[in-house]
Amino acid sequence: MTAPLFKFGYFNDEVSLIVAFVIGIFFGLVLEKGGFGSARMLAAQFYFTDMRVFKVMFTAIVTAMIGLFYFSWVGVLDLSLVYFGETFLLPQLLGGLILGVGFVIGGYCPGTSAVAISTGRIDAIFYALGGMFGIFVFGEMFPYITDFFYSTAMGKINLPELLDINYGLIMLVVILMAIGGFTAAEWAEKLMANKQSKARG
Amino acid sequence: MLKFKEWFSHHHEDNAMEGHITQKHYTNPYLIGLLLGIVLLSTFLIMGRGLGASGVLSTAVSVAVDKVAPSQTENNDFYKGYLGDGTKNPFKDWLTFNILGAVLGGFISGAISGRNKLMVEKGPRFSKGKRFLYAFIGGSLMGFGAKMARGCTSGQALTGGAMLSVGGWAFMIMVFVGAYGMAYFVRRQWT
């Protein structure tokens, strides 16, 4: 076991900030190169005209998921040392719903707005200002919604544990779901392209 | 010395058109997904944690509230979580440096592809003023929702998704439900 490198003391806190910056550069490069600096490209997902949000997200999730499993299986990575967020089901369902509504109205999510700002999209600045306002509202409301925020606590739980199904089998299901989703996405894009070219005559 | 403005439109080809979206020079989404997955996996292997993007905004808000009204943050665990114990600068944080890197990375990629351009992202039938208003409203909902869910698309959907976290998957499904449910009502903004 040598990974996660930071947890095994290969470098200190100060160096971890440089690592954060370097990883961030690659994160930003990939997001922009994928078209995620454009709110229209992101919003196109929800009108079925360009499904790259779904394609990129699920390819990334499948890649990282398989990688995590592989490196822990060969004994390089101690998976128990990788930070795993606790599940609070209801707040996370509601938070996801609100963020999704905000996604199609605002045109970005937090990470993509950073890339949009750096490539000169003025609307993304308003989006980020709105983001801070929303966080401020949440912060001011926090004393009153604390109970809800900590409700339906399920602890550190993953899908294999929840469903009591083998980890590898869940991975296979996720991979098959992704492939099915990609096929549907390609089909939807073609359908919409035909519809649009017909509408233009 | 390079003039700042030249950075934003020094290409012969304009790859950031207003009016309609241009597909030019955007890399294949499956290749991008693979690369993003490798970035995420590297973060797990090097740091033992995932990516996150909304944290830095929370730090900024908490610091601002603490400056303006310190009594507000004293009894509020939400703000205190981002301010820390006072022994170090709250901005000297992993997520802050991560997102600063992303800003630089996006700029580099935009410069290479000729997409760095001062413009507003919107459909042809929508005014700039309304777009700014919608961006602000959408951003507010995003900020609120991300805090309620303890993470955003990066922290919960991508990171939690790859870890097969129950909360991450529940969050991700609801993001798509919310966005598809709302899409019809804001279609004039984009189409």
Image: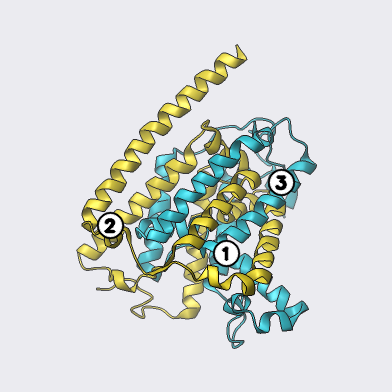
Chain colours: A yellow, B cyan
Binning the other alpha carbons within 10 Å of mark 3 as few (below 14), some (14 to 19) or many (20 upward) gives many
| Residue B5 in view in this figure | yes
**Disc 3 designates what residue?**
B134
Quadrant into which the N terminus of chain A falls: bottom left
**Disc 2 designates what residue?**
A163
Binning the other alpha carbons within 10 Å of mark 2 as few (below 14), some (14 to 19) or many (20 upward) gives few
Q: Chain of mark 1?
A: B
**Disc 1 designates what residue?**
B147
| Residue B2 in view in this figure | no
**Nearer the observer, disc 3 or disc 2?**
2
Q: Chain of mark 3?
A: B
Q: How many marks?
A: 3
Q: Residue at x 56, y 17 (%)?
A: A197
Task: Give me the disc on residue B6.
Answer: none
Amino acid type, label 3:
Tyr
Residue A123 falls left or right of residue A142: right
| Residue A136 quadrant | bottom right
Tag 1 and tag 2 share a subunit: no
